Image (spheres, helix red, strand yellow):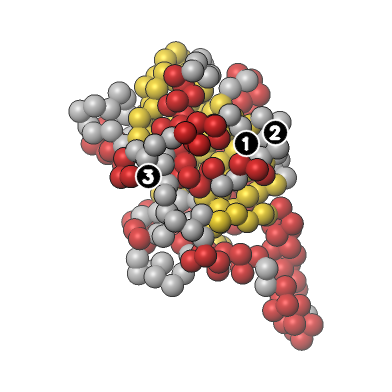
């Protein structure tokens, strides 16, 4: 059963400067709604009950967004505006699901995951990277089905242009399991075009086993001096853990870059 999700939110968002110089990128509106709410809605629809936000002191604004009760109550008392009441109720619903942990040094996604160790209850959990929006079809929901079917860890996958492989984690495939799913042999964080084993990239949705924490505790920094989740997944694969790459059907929007962020608003407004 996948009931818990973790969301790393401590990233500085330098690719979105100047928008992120005083503002958390995950609160930036995409077609009138903060990006993080799309991610939370995906979780809720996929049956997730608990969400752990990994923030930093610099991103405390994210916590404030969900804990602004005094402000809302005062406004609602004065104005009784049904729209504001509805929005506040939605925020209360999110707030009930969320716990916060802190990663004050930007040491990488693997390090962020490690901060959630004592909160994970079940054998597997979901991780969503908030820069990666997937619309039109709920990717987390599909991946939970794949996890149940193959009794394995699952990672979202998408074919990318060969020239851009060094931007992503890249899979080395093992067997085709069916139309949308492959078992994988290896995964390499941001390889060069020459060394990349395929053009199938990791997109930010992962169903990971709790055993990954032990790998992360022993892990040395990798590319760019960061602790990468991809490297810990590679250790799991070496020990013959089954991991499935799921070619998701939704539409991917890269909200972590300026071009992608602008495009995402246009795409979502067409839905
Ligand atoms: C992270 C992962 C990478 C993955 C990507 C998907 O990279 O490390 O393996 O392909 O997310 O968006 P980042 O975007 O943090 O550089």
Would you call the spot at circle 1 few (<14 residues within 10 Å), some (14-19), or many (20 or more)? many
Badge 2 vs badge 1, beta-carbon distance below 8 Å: yes
Query: Left or right: 42 with respect to 254?
Result: right
Residue placed at 40% from the left, 59% from the top? Answer: 13
Q: Which of label 2 and label 3 is nearer to you?
A: 3
Disc number at residue 253?
none
**Which residue occupies the extreme bottom position in the image?**
78
Query: Left or right: 66 with respect to 216?
Result: right
Disc number at residue 125?
1
Using the numbered discs, state the Cα–Cα distance from disc 3 to disc 1 in whole angstroms. Answer: 22 Å
Label 3: state its secondary structure.
loop
Please say if 225 is above or below 211. Answer: below
Q: Position of residue 43 (x, y in %)?
A: 64, 45
Please say if 150 is above or below 87. Answer: above
Residue placed at 53% from the left, 19% from the top? Answer: 242
Badge 3 vs badge 1, beta-carbon distance below 8 Å: no
Q: Position of residue 248 (x, y in %)?
A: 50, 32
Q: Position of residue 96 (x, y in %)?
A: 74, 57
Disc number at residue 226?
3
Query: Label 2, on which residue?
Result: 122
Of labels 2 and 3, earlier in sequence is 2
Residue placed at 34% from the left, 38% from the top? Answer: 222
Using the numbered discs, state the Cα–Cα distance from disc 2 to disc 3 in whole angstroms. Answer: 27 Å
Using the numbered discs, state the Cα–Cα distance from disc 2 to disc 1 in whole angstroms. Answer: 7 Å
From the image, which quarter does the N terminus lie in?
Answer: top right
Would you call the spot at circle 2 few (<14 residues within 10 Å), some (14-19), or many (20 or more)? few
Residue placed at 48% from the left, 66% from the top? Answer: 58
Label 2: state its secondary structure.
loop
Badge 2 vs badge 3, beta-carbon distance below 8 Å: no
């Amino acid at each position: 059963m996948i009931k818990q999700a973790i969301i790393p939110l401590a990233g500085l968002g330098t690719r979105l400067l100047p928008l992120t110089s005083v503002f958390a990128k995950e609160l930036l509106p995409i077609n009138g709604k903060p990006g993080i709410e799309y991610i939370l809605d995906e979780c809720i629809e996929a049956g997730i009950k608990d969400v752990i936000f990994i923030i930093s002191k610099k991103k405390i604004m994210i916590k404030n967004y969900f804990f602004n009760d005094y402000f809302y109550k005062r406004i609602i008392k004065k104005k009784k505006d049904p729209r504001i009441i509805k929005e506040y109720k939605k925020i209360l619903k999110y707030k009930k699901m969320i716990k916060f942990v802190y990663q004050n040094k930007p040491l990488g996604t693997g390090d962020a995951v490690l901060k959630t160790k004592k909160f994970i209850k079940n054998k597997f959990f979901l991780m969503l990277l908030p820069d990666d929006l997937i619309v039109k079809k709920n990717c987390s929901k599909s991946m939970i089905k794949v996890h149940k079917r193959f009794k394995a860890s699952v990672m979202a996958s998408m074919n990318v242009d060969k020239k851009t492989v060094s931007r992503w984690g890249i899979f080395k495939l093992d067997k085709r399991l069916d139309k949308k799913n492959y078992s994988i042999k290896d995964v390499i964080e941001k390889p060069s075009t020459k060394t990349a084993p395929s053009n199938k990239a990791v997109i930010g949705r992962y169903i990971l086993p709790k055993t990954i924490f032990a790998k992360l505790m022993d892990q040395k920094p990798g590319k760019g001096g960061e602790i990468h989740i991809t490297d810990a997944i590679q250790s799991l694969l070496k020990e013959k853990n089954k991991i499935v790459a799921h070619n998701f059907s939704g539409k991917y929007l890269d909200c972590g870059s300026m071009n992608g962020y602008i495009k995402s608003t246009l795409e979502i407004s067409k839905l």
